Image: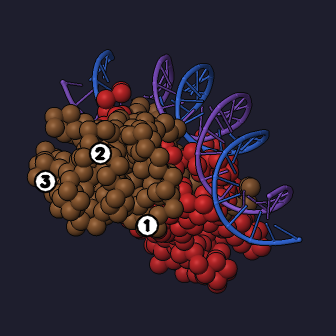
Chain colours: A brown, B red, C purple, D blue
Amino acid sequence: MPDLNARQFAQLPPLQAIRVFEAVARHLSFTKAAEELGMTQAAASYQIKLLEERIGAPLFLRRPKQIELTEPGQRLAPAVSEAFSLLSGAYSAARAGAEGVLCVSTLLTFASNWLAQHLGSFQVAHPSLAVRVDTSNRVVDFAREDIDIAIRSGGGKWPGVETHMLFKADFTPVLSPRLAASIGGVNEPADLLKLPILDPGDIWWQEWFELAGLPAEELASRPGTSMGAQAYEANAAMAGHGVAILTRALFKNELADGRLIQPFDLVGDDGHAYWLVYPTARRNVPKIRAFRDWILAEIACQ
Amino acid sequence: MPDLNARQFAQLPPLQAIRVFEAVARHLSFTKAAEELGMTQAAASYQIKLLEERIGAPLFLRRPKQIELTEPGQRLAPAVSEAFSLLSGAYSAARAGAEGVLCVSTLLTFASNWLAQHLGSFQVAHPSLAVRVDTSNRVVDFAREDIDIAIRSGGGKWPGVETHMLFKADFTPVLSPRLAASIGGVNEPADLLKLPILDPGDIWWQEWFELAGLPAEELASRPGTSMGAQAYEANAAMAGHGVAILTRALFKNELADGRLIQPFDLVGDDGHAYWLVYPTARRNVPKIRAFRDWILAEIACQ
DNA sequence: CATGATCCATAAAGAGGCCTTATGCCCGAT
DNA sequence: ATCGGGCATAAGGCCTCTTTATGGATCATG
């Protein structure tokens, strides 16, 4: 496409040469400018000559032991300097900005039940890093969304990303003490069937009852609503509306203080887990390393 | 010099990539930007990837059929655009400026007796070109002075410059009619010796008298002042102060209207001439071509 | 639902721009 | 007079960037 090319090149100066020009105009010396730019004096000379030919006029007067700006040079220099400081400012701002804000995409329940409680210690450890939490149940595509790091649940095999397991996505029935008491206590798995089951269509129920040795076909036909997030079902369960099947790790507090109880030790496990994931290509970006190191330590010590 | 290089590169963005980024951000399309820049889409993709790695964050979100700026990208784009428009403005101003002002270095007499009278027609022909005339008897060095084109007198052999002969630097005595009448007319070369000779040390006198077949050793011992420019001596001659030896081409008007008379057809010629000269490297610069073409035509048609 | 069109990513290979090395010239200073 | 600092120039090589070619993904269309 020679035409467009030519037109474009006529309008915009050769940038490399402009960069050299800026340095030479500032130092009024080819040698010093070349030093600053980390190249040889010959290279600087070459670039300036190039630019002078492009412009059609000399930019410097070669005096013995010293050079001077010609009239066109004098007109060009200040604008170039300003443009470059603008550029370099914006560039480092973009770098800093990219370093200063960490966008975490996470599942809703993980955000509300784990991250919200722990994030404080991260911010203490990294006061200069602002964290933006983006909660959604979608699977994020790092190429399509403005996300640095994510928490996903699943099998842990995704292409192009690094993964670290946070905890198993196990599942076991939980309910409020009051609801359990209302039928004289939940003593065996079959007792649960006397109670309302929250989201009875959930595959976890099938698997858990199977594990418990009970037929659970009946469940599938029960009416019920899927709330889409464990946190919602946990709330419903705490309110006494029924039995939920949840991942314990996400409800340590509720289980510890008795708002929810786990009637059976039997815990289902379909091999899924909660994972920390981020693009392999960005594994060494400082803020990503910082968050990764922090969350793994935090998970490990609890 | 790897150290300096690295430091420098950390501070300033890779300019070629920035140029591509600017176009992509404007079009929100790799393909369109590449078209505008006269390169392939693959090249644009490469440069953006490069810049993203340098910055440490994605600049665009790749959505189907469309891309979007990420947060860092949004911060970077406006500043880059502004810097570029500044640059391109200054650049074309420098070009225009370089194109719009023509600096002519000329000998004093040529300026006052030829250029001053003809320059008007050049400005009519090229109204957008401002001419700055720099008169000096020095030989200009195009690398050391801010001069586009010059008129020199001499043999016509200089390195690195294009030359065009304007007219021969011939010489013949001239004087005012009144001065000639004061000795009853100047009828033969020897009559001149009865009159004051302006700048008797001038080599031209030696050569002319030699040509006329007269001994002129006596002249060298006469007191006299060299005024340094033919124009001055012409003025002295017109005022009747003596006989000057001048180049006729420069005094056509004075000879035509009788302020000066040329008593003898005998004209000296030492092979020197007036030349138009300019750097070979700049022979195709438009304003230089314009001036050259104009002056050669002007000289030819008179 | 299949097909084609559009857009971006990627790999491989080639070209050319840019840098370095080496040298020369010029001027001023010791 | 010689030396030293500064810029210009030539030759050569590397490395960046570009092109070509291809694949994957999405969206529109019949």
- Write down the residue under mark 1: A224
Residue A75: give x, y in percent of width and height: 40, 65
Secondary element under disc 2, as helix, strand or loop, is loop
- Dot 1, crowdedness within 10 Å: few (<14), some or many (≥20)? some
* Image point (48%, 74%), residue name: B235
Subunit bearing disc 2: A
Q: Earlier in the sequence, mark 3 or mark 1?
A: 1
Between B132 and A198, the one nearer to me in the picture: A198
* Image point (24%, 65%), residue name: A240
Mark 3 or mark 2, whichever is nearer to me: 2
Secondary element under disc 3, as helix, strand or loop, is loop
Which residue extends farthest front?
A184
Q: Earlier in the sequence, mark 2 or mark 1?
A: 2
Quadrant assignment for the C terminus of chain B:
bottom right
Residue C12: give x, y in percent of width and height: 70, 28
Q: How far is mark 2 from mark 1, CA to CA?
A: 23 Å
Same subunit, tags 3 and 2: yes
Secondary element under disc 1, as helix, strand or loop, is loop
Same subunit, tags 3 and 1: yes
Residue B173 located left or right of residue A277: right
Amino acid on which the number 3 mark rests in the picture: Gly
Between B93 and B208, the one nearer to me in the picture: B93
Same subunit, tags 2 and 1: yes
Subunit bearing disc 1: A
Between A172 and B247, the one nearer to me in the picture: A172
Quarter of the figure with residue B77:
bottom left
* Image point (56%, 60%), residue name: B63
Residue B271: give x, y in percent of width and height: 67, 48
- Write down the residue under mark 3: A258
- Write down the residue under mark 2: A188
